[in-house]
């Protein structure tokens, strides 16, 4: 098992929550809460579900008669929009801010729950008028604007299944995802702002639609206002549509079965074809809202900022859905963290009085690089809790976040989870003593273990595979259109247990330290990418015969991609070609997938059966021993 990127850790360095944090927490007796949930998880999950609205109550909390196709809240009727919107407009919360938004150039917008509900209703009616019905897929390809949230909630409301594609993906990646989901409707925008530049979303969308035959309607939200091509009878402006009489502010919420699909979110796996992770209305609404409530102690007075992109699972769960189910005020920022200066984030924390902030280690390291003077210029005393997600947080970044950003007042909730898990799985709660670099213990009701390849629990300090030993409400239900892949990938190595794809170790206190992926998935700046996606992007260029990609440790990004290419006969290696290939990847897959370096090689280490041994490439690049190479052919 690879151990190349483990930061230096100290398993005996403790941080204890202050008296204030302990006093204000929802759960003051963590141990008792934990024990109770573990003793009878189904009763615990039933109790959590009772806090939400249902058109019809479930008959059974869990149906485990056909594993791994588990069903939660069987027989229950609901809609996540009923809980995130409808129920709030009948209470005092109709006047509360649901969202605060700041554009990169400094514009500000706020939406009360009432307003958000109206906007969602309008767009829901637009979708219905385009023939979108329960179960139909809608692809959304946008920047970080409120309309992205509105579009997602509108899909949920009318029972459509959204598939959001992150704005950092390009033509082919978008086309593949549209095609796999068979979306007839695409929602996009003219362009997105990033570092003062326009990202040409519409232009990319046009090319993707050209490559995928199923799209009939494209809705275009006007953000940048620059000239874009509009195809007659296919492309419509968002603002024109919501001005039509059909776009009334009343839109009936579709009554959904608890197990009806809510969204597909594509994520990287071990093959070039991305996996459509499918989540459903009932279990997902319970799981995301329960975890957010207890882990971040979210209260009505809070101003919550999850700095992720709505196009990834973190944004789906903790920008769009859970905060609104809890009736919280959620802040969203459009642009780059350092635009125009490295104090941008801290300035916004001060201005909006953010109380809880949740981001990724890569962002913290990126800002830490600019020094403490930037945050120190701002009053960050509104913050009371901090969060981290996406990759292991190295103790140095942890301490900077804790001391400089949090003023040593704010415990850091290091939450381990995945697109597949729907919400936090291994995480502290505010009163849990912390160790920098460890996500501590499983969330109450979740049973996690570190095991060897035979399934035996590892001893303290021993590396092993991270598994989840019983189902939970927020779990993925399948891989869209590929139930066999779902079974094989996650449930075949240890039947009955969910295989996470991560390695980890437990320490003598039972705290879990996640080490990293054991498969061909790389985390670059917290973004999840498959080596296979980069490789198939490279070989789609005429000059490349074969390619291999690996992740190498990087101080800020966590990992960067290094690619190795064997060129076709007659093609000369040159720095110009390296640039050209990087550009090709930027177009085909997206800027996030561009390798930091491309090396031209004559051969690649392969097994006798022809599989590339990325592990050997990685060891060589790092100047480390190659390990077991008995299967190496070369
Ligand atoms: C990694 C992101 C260590 C892990 C929510 C996992 C983490 C993958 C942490 C999922 C953490 C996420 N500590 N590693 N706190 N959080 N990971 O699907 O390798 O984009 O398997 O979901 O991120 O990435 P995904």
Image: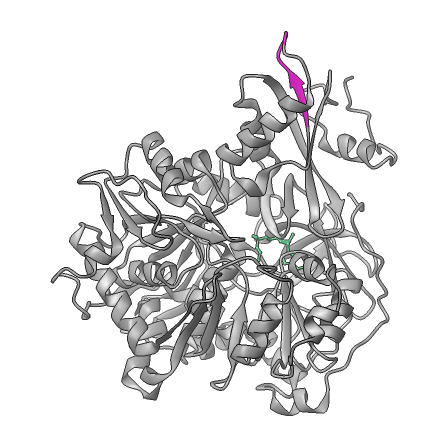
Q: Residue furthest left?
A: 245
Seen from the viewer's position, the closer of residues 360 and 278 is: 360
The quadrant of the picture occupied by the C terminus is top right
Residue occupying the point 35% across, 30% down: 211
Residue occupying the point 57% across, 86% down: 26
Reply above or below: 586 against 123: above
Q: Is residue 187 left or right of residue 301?
A: left
Q: Residue furthest top?
A: 570
Residue 21: in magenta span: no
How many marks on residues? Answer: 0
Reply above or below: 439 against 88: above
Residue 554, given in percent of the width and then of the height, sits at 74, 47
Q: Is residue 387 left or right of residue 191?
A: right
The quadrant of the picture occupied by the N terminus is top right
Q: How is the image coloured?
A: one colour
Residue 333, given in percent of the width and then of the height, sits at 49, 64
Seen from the viewer's position, the closer of residues 248 and 467 is: 248
Region in magenta: 564-570
Q: Is residue 3 left or right of residue 163?
A: right
Residue 70, given in percent of the width and then of the height, sits at 45, 57
Residue occupying the point 29% across, 72% down: 117
Residue 265 in sight from this viewpoint:
yes
Residue 57 in sight from this viewpoint:
no
Q: In which quadrant of this rendering is ligand 1 seen?
A: bottom right
Residue 200, given in percent of the width and then of the height, sits at 42, 43
């Amino acid at each position: 098992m690879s151990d190349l990127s483990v930061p230096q850790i100290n398993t005996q360095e403790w941080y204890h929550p202050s008296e204030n944090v302990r006093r204000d927490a929802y759960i003051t007796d963590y141990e008792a809460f934990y024990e109770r949930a573990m003793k009878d998880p189904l009763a615990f999950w039933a109790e959590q579900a009772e806090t939400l609205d249902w058109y019809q109550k479930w008959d059974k909390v869990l149906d485990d008669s056909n594993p791994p196709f588990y069903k939660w809240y069987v027989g229950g009727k609901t809609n996540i929009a009923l809980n995130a919107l409808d129920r709030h407009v009948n209470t005092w919360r109709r006047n509360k801010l649901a969202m605060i938004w700041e554009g990169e150039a400094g514009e500000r917008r706020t939406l009360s729950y009432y307003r958000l509900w109206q906007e969602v209703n309008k767009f829901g009616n637009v979708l219905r008028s385009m023939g979108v019905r329960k179960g139909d897929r809608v692809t959304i390809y946008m920047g970080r604007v409120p309309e992205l949230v509105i579009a997602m909630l509108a899909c949920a409301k009318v029972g459509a299944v959204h598939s959001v594609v992150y704005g950092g993906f390009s033509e082919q990646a978008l086309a593949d995802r549209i095609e796999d989901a068979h979306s007839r409707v695409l929602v996009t925008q003219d362009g997105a702002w990033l570092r003062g530049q326009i990202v040409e979303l519409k232009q990319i969308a046009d090319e993707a639609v050209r490559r995928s035959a199923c799209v009939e309607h494209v809705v275009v939200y006007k953000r940048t206002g620059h000239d874009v091509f509009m195809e007659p009878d296919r492309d419509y402006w968002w603002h024109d549509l919501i001005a039509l009489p059909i776009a009334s502010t009343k839109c009936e919420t579709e009554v959904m079965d608890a197990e009806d699909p809510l969204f597909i979110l594509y994520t990287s796996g071990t093959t070039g074809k991305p996996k459509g992770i499918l989540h459903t209305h009932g279990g997902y609404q319970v799981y995301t809202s329960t975890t957010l409530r207890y882990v971040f102690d979210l209260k009505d007075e809070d101003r919550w900022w999850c700095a992720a992109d709505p196009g990834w699972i973190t944004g789906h769960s903790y920008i769009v859905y859970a905060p609104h189910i809890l009736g919280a005020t959620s802040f969203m920022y459009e642009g780059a963290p350092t635009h125009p200066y490295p104090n941008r984030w801290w300035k916004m924390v001060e201005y909006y009085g953010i109380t809880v902030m949740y981001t990724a280690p890569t962002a913290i390291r990126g800002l830490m690089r600019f020094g403490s003077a930037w945050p120190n210029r701002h009053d960050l005393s509104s913050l009371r809790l901090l969060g981290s997600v996406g990759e292991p947080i190295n103790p140095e970044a942890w301490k900077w976040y804790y001391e400089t950003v949090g003023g040593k007042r704010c415990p850091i909730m290091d939450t381990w989870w995945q697109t597949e898990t729907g919400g936090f799985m291994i995480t502290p709660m505010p009163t849990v003593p912390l160790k920098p670099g460890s996500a501590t213990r499983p969330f109450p009701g979740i049973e996690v273990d570190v095991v060897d390849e035979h399934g035996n629990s590892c001893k303290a300090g021993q590396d092993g595979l991270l598994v989840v030993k019983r189902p939970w409400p927020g779990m993925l239900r399948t891989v869209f259109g590929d139930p066999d892949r779902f079974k094989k990938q996650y449930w075949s190595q240890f039947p009955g247990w969910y295989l996470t794809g991560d390695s980890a170790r437990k320490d003598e206190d039972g705290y879990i330290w996640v080490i990293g992926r054991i498969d061909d998935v790389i985390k670059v700046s917290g973004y999840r990418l498959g080596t296979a996606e980069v490789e198939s992007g490279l070989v789609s260029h005429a000059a490349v015969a074969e390619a291999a990609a690996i992740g190498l440790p990087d101080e800020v990004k966590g990992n960067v991609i290094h690619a190795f290419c064997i060129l076709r006969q007659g093609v000369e290696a040159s720095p110009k070609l390296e640039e050209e290939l990087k550009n090709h990847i930027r177009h085909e897959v997206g800027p996030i997938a561009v390798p930091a370096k491309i090396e031209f090689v004559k051969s690649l280490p392969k097994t006798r059966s022809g599989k590339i041994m990325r592990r050997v490439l990685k060891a060589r690049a790092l100047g480390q021993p190659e390990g077991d190479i008995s299967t190496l052919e070369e």
